[in-house]
Amino acid sequence: MKKTLPSLFIALILFASCKKSSTTDPTAPTVTTSGITVTSSATVTGGGDITADGGGTVMAEGLIWSTTPNLSTALSTKTNDGVTDGIFTSTITGLSPHVTYYAVAYVTTNGGTAYGNMVSFTTSGLVSTFAGSGAIGFLNGQGTAATFFYPYSVAADANGNIYVADLSNNAIRKITSAGLVSTLAGNGTAGFVNGQGTAASFNYPYGLAVDANGNVYVADLGNQAIRKITPAGLVTTLAGSGSAGYADGQGTAASFNNPTGLAVDANYNVYVADIKNNAIRKITPAGLVSTLAGSTAFGFVNGQGTAATFFNPTDVAVDANGNVYVADLGNQAIRKITSAGVVSTLAGSGNAGALDGQGTAASFYGPSSVAVDANGNVYVADKQNNSIRKITPAGLVSTLAGAGAQGALNGSSASASFRYPTGVAVDANTNVYVADSNNNLIRKITQ
């Protein structure tokens, strides 16, 4: 018995030691946050990877998210995605379009709660149909009850009204912020008559611009003229002789050769994309026409004023500092003209393509229209790419909306589709409006 007592004592100690080890409290787990995939304007998927459970049992896991990087783990919204060990997937819904969010993965066990690294993501914009049924017609009415016939360009005023150059209807339409469509001027018949509202006539109105007082300017291509419509609907001719030509001068003594795009600055100067003259023209409030940049020769040369060259410039936009942006269609580029008349290339390689990127590393295919917001971002209707592009003031090009394929799908900006968009405008809230010409629709992109 004396010989077996030590062995028995050691066995008891080992048993007690094992029992104590088996009841050790678990420690907090560790988790990493996986990348976020944006699937729509309101939904993303992500998740996490539980790299160690700390000896505990998983009780809850998911993502916590907020619009601020100072994310409160207690107060922010979270998902609860069950009790999967290892890698788990979470889906966040109900997000706002084109907003930057911050997220971290979390996991809770009976050993505590752990949080992963923070990641950020930005939801896509939302594309919808603002007006038009898609059918060809000339009907006024609410939203999709109205009809257009090849709406070519759009412009926005300070009150949120949208104006449409309804090309094949030879009319200028107006859409209120609530979506009610009416006819501001023109009657559906081609002509060159000044007058009140529908008593006036146009001949292929291509471009539009609106000044701070609500006057609408029209590039009346078939009439080789720039027309002006007051808020009350009175139509007059601001400049242009009615015949194709290239002459500077006063009002109707000046001539254009297929004016297609317009912009107006804070001082009520009107800029004209004079496509067949390969020039950008300027009209003072008094109607005096001059050439800001370009000449009748086509080319792709930067420089001062008329020493610079363009190739079928189709549209213009002007920012708060007086810089003019040009959709240089034939050169597949967006050009910039300073208030002093110096021409440079903001973006576009000169070759057709659909590449996002910095400045001249990016490419376009048929840039037909430009607009600029209060922050200096430039928007481009990239016609042949069936997309809307965005250029930051630093020249970084991205695709705002449009998957590239032809169509009329609404939804997230990444999956939505257009059919040869030719016009673009932006309002004070940075909503972007698109003349989706071959769909006979006016689309809206909520950023």
Image: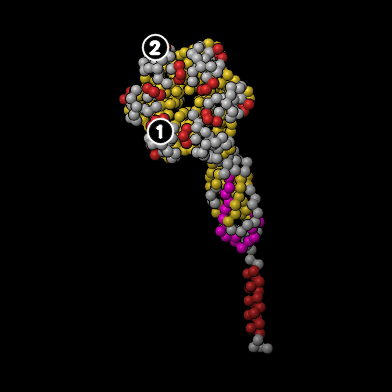
Q: Where does the N terminus fall, quadrant-wise?
A: bottom right
- The residue labelled by disc 1 is 332
Q: Observer-nearest residue: 392 or 107?
A: 392
Image point 58% across, 41% down: which residue? 40
- Is 278 magenta? The answer is no
- Is 54 magenta? The answer is yes
Say which element carries label 1. Answer: loop
In the rendered image, the vertical position of residue 99 relative to residue 434, given as above or below: below
Residue 294 on image: x %, y %: 35, 24
Q: What stretch is highlighted in magenta?
A: 44-60
Q: Where does the C terminus fall, quadrant-wise?
A: top right
Image point 37% across, 22% down: which residue? 277
Image point 66% across, 74% down: which residue? 16
Residue 135 on image: x %, y %: 59, 28
**Amino acid type of the residue that numbered disc 2 sits on in the rendered structure:** Ala
Task: Tell me the tag on residue 173.
Answer: none
Residue 63 on image: x %, y %: 60, 49
**Amino acid type of the residue that numbered disc 1 sits on in the rendered structure:** Gln
